[in-house]
Image (cartoon, rainbow, N blue to C red):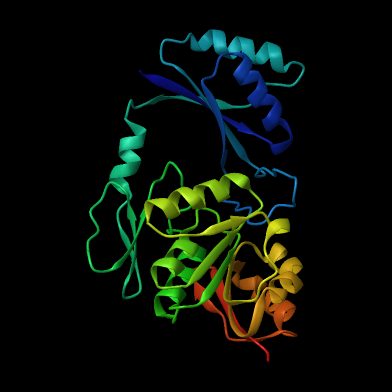
Amino acid sequence: MAWIQFIFQSAPDTADRLSDVLSECGAGAVTFQDNADQPIYEPEIGTTPLWSSTNVIALFDAESDTDNIVTMVSELLAPQSIPSYRIEAVEDKDWVREWMDNFHPISFGEKLWICPSWHQPPQADAINIMLDPGLAFGTGTHPTTALCLNWLDQADIKDKYVIDYGCGSGILAIAAALLGAKKVIGVDTDPQALEATQANAQRNGVQIDTFLPDDCPNESCDILLANILAGPLQTLAPRLASLTQPGADLVLSGILDIQAEIVSQSYQTTFTMQSPVQKGEWIRLTGQRHD
């Protein structure tokens, strides 16, 4: 099926209304896109902020009458004026296949690999985490996840008790289990993340117990991994400290370089914090629990 897309340049306070109007006009899909290279790293909880210049992109069947769509949008938006726009043809592709073709195995350190489920692992004797993108919330390509995987690749995980707090797709928890951890649990606020972790754990033949935060056992672990965001990491400092035993390793990520110092300070009463490790504008903090 062939498609065309309308690309409207909108202000953030009108983007939602324009999206609703386009859906009423028969758009098959409506998406928002940054039009000003303005990243939004850490929105307030319960908010969905948009960029100061937002592209609202609406997908229509290529046989649609574009003049009629413009007329309908203008009438439904009135008295607000229709934003400037352009119309583009969209090449008909098998988008899932295209994504699959561009997702290749990735190595992290000396022995750890992330492999999509349709690829043969490049090194059969390596620690290969097999992922199904239909279930995964992450694939290891983001710098924050890569920083944690690099740490795990170099760490002594064997026979350790590991907690992955904010487990998402379970990549870090699965890596720990495959590296020899005796027990791994994953914690996340999103039940779908826990389902994804369980499905990916089953695919990789490892056992991971998953919990919502309120149900997390009050047990002290040897290694605590938390790849979240700077704000929640600061708030969670007492809770994460309570889940670690003396000498335990702490690994924090999801932190911008400009946030490193303030996050580190939140943990210094309980952990001996080390210098941050940086990848792009993201950093990883590590520490060891005081006796």
Outermost residue, bottom direction? 291
Name the side, left or right, on which 23 lies relative to 277: right
- Residue 48 seen from this side: yes
Quadrant of the image occupied by residue 140: bottom left
In the depicted structure, whether residue 175 falls above or below residue 98: below
- Residue 137 seen from this side: no
Residue 67: where, in percent of width, then height? 53, 10
Name the side, left or right, on which 38 lies relative to 150: right
Quadrant of the image occupied by residue 253: bottom right
In the depicted structure, whether residue 230 falls above or below residue 101: below
The number of numbered badges drawn on the structure is: 0
User: Which residue appears at 50% of the width and 52% of the height?
Assistant: 197
Residue 89: where, in percent of width, then height? 39, 24
Residue 39: where, in percent of width, then height? 60, 53
- Viewer-proximal residue among 151 and 129: 129
User: Which residue appears at 76% of the width and 73% of the height?
Assistant: 238
In the depicted structure, whether residue 158 falls above or below residue 247: above
Report the quarter where the N terminus lies. top left
Residue 283: where, in percent of width, then height? 55, 72
- Viewer-proximal residue among 163 and 141: 163
In the depicted structure, whether residue 3 falls above or below residue 68: below
